[in-house]
Amino acid sequence: MPEEPEPGTFVLGTDTLVTIGGAVMGKPASAGEATAMLEALSGRTHQVVSGVALQRIGGAGRTGAADRVEVASAVTDVTFSRLHPGQVGSYIASREWKGKAGGYAVQGLAGLFVTELNGEYSNVMGLPLCLLGRLFRRLGFDLVRRTWLEGGF
């Protein structure tokens, strides 16, 4: 049986998807699916959307307040250059696409495909850090200073 979390513990849940022209792209199940995703993204702007839920287990910090959950999302517009079949094939062969929404990892070779990015870069990597920092602050904790805020939350 799992242990009860300590007061002041944070529980984080997040997931990311890619959307273009009303179509939602999750994580491709095969190289063929990843190829189709990259071909659809080629030369176009798409959105990377991450949903984040952060829960604070009550009883810590200055207020000892009860449990609270903050939920938010981040959206980043990403534009790809027009990809040539050889680029797509080489990227697929790298296997970087595995387990990645939209079939790519911007922090790897696919960074070479990005011509424009509007929004949080870390969101495209799968965890919007700026948004996460705001959620922590709403729950009474400053990540930069690594301390509880005055007045709790």
Image (cartoon, grey):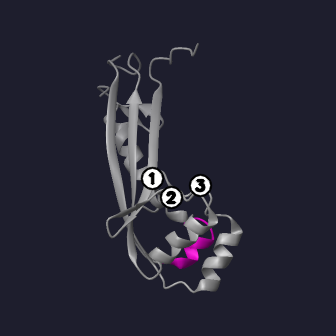
Q: Position of residue 134 (x, y in %)?
A: 35, 44
- x 35%, y 21%: residue: 67
Q: CA distance from mark 1 to mark 3?
A: 11 Å
- x 38%, y 19%: residue: 58
Q: Inspect the magenta stretch and tell me whether residue 107 lies in it.
A: yes
Q: Secondary structure at mark 2?
A: helix
In the picture, the disc for residue 101 is 2
Residue 149 position by quadrant: top left
In the picture, the disc for residue 95 is none
Q: Are marks 1 and 2 in contact (CB under 8 Å)?
A: yes
- x 29%, y 28%: residue: 153
Residue 14 position by quadrant: top left
Q: Position of residue 65 (x, y in %)?
A: 32, 18
Judge by depth and name the residue closer to the eye, 76 or 130: 76
The earlier-in-sequence mark between 1 and 3 is: 1
The residue indicated by pointer 3 is 99
| Classed neighbour count for the residue bearing mark 3: other residues with Cα under 10 Å, few (<14), some (14–19), many (≥20) | some
Judge by depth and name the residue closer to the eye, 135 or 103: 103
Q: Secondary structure at mark 1?
A: strand
Q: Are marks 3 and 2 in contact (CB under 8 Å)?
A: no
In the picture, the disc for residue 16 is 1
**Three-letter amino acid code at the position of disc 3:** Gly
Judge by depth and name the residue closer to the eye, 69 or 102: 102
Q: CA distance from mark 1 to mark 2?
A: 6 Å
**Segment tinted magenta in the rendering:** 106-114
Q: CA distance from mark 3 to mark 2?
A: 7 Å
